[in-house]
Image (cartoon, helix red, strand yellow):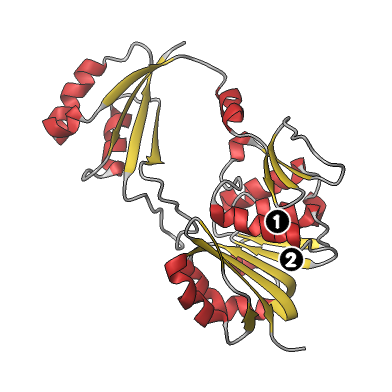
Amino acid sequence: MPWQQLSLEAGELDPERLSAFFEQAGALSVTFVDAADQPLFEPDPGTTPLWSATRVTALFAEDADLASLRQEFSGEFGEAAAERLHAETLQDQNWERAWLERFQPMRFGERLWICPDGQRPPQADDAVLIDLDPGLAFGTGTHPTTALCLEWLDRHPPVDLEVLDYGCGSGILAIAALKLGAASVHAVDIDRQALWASRDNAGRNAVAAGLWTGLPDELPEGSFDLVLANILANPLIELAPQLAPRVRAGGMLVLSGILEAQAGEVVAAYRPWFELEQPVVQDGWVRLAGRRKGS
């Protein structure tokens, strides 16, 4: 069965107000997507941030009267906004399969691969494969910040180490650490949906036994051999006094989600506790790694 779709870049309009209008008009679903390739990472507690350029897309049944809806939209938001509406017909298809065709296995470092379910790359005998569920696809390794962390893990396998993944998202770094030999991983996030995704993905990769998940205030006392935190520069700076004690003396810290212009501030926040290596930059994003001072 085909579907009808209306979309527009919100611009000066409130995306939430647009969403409410489409829902009241009978939309089967309304989604927000990034219209300008602006990543969003770990939000502050209680916030739901949107991109500065947000595209709102509403899906309607085949028999919906979009002409009348466009007139109502013009009356509500103005003729200029109505002219930005883009209508199209979507033919029914296997959407999961279409997603899989766009998401191919990706390699990070020498032997670490991220794969959609059922796909396998040409691989050497020592390849380490991580399967991800298309339904839980946020945090798939495609963004430079995640790629930088995966490449670090590939080069520094955490064999027999106790690891903390702070801001775990889909659990991709936690799973990579476990598949590369970590003894255990504690995965923390402020979003319970991220924790569910992490557990689900860990299960499909047969590493759930080594994974603990929880909210920040549920994290047990103690320190770790390796702490990974792929969030944002400002939260990283604020969290420095909390994250530093979580790294054992001589242990490693890996930070990402940092724009190149922000690296100096993050370095200054962590320098009292860590001997930091030179920043590694990819597409304007930075990874910082360092060893905890002390013996």
Tag 2's secondary structure?
A: strand
Question: Which residue is drawn at the image coordinates 57% and 30% (left, top)?
Answer: 102
Foreground of the two, 19 or 281:
281
Q: Is residue 2 left or right of residue 69?
A: right
Residue 168 visible at all: no
Instruction: Give the residue drawn at x 22%, y 31%.
Output: 84
The residue at 12%/30% (across/down) is 79
Which numbered circle lies on residue 174?
1
Give coordinates of residue 70: x percent, y percent: 20, 23
> For the residue marked with disc 2, what is the amino acid?
Val
Rendering quarter of residue 227: bottom right
Quick one: 165 or 277, which is closer to the camera? 277
As measured in the structure, the alpha-carbon distance from the residue carrying label 2 to the one carrying label 1 is 8 Å
- Quarter location, residue 217: bottom right
At 63% from the left and 82% from the top, the residue drawn is 274
Residue wearing tag 2: 163
Residue 105 visible within the image = yes
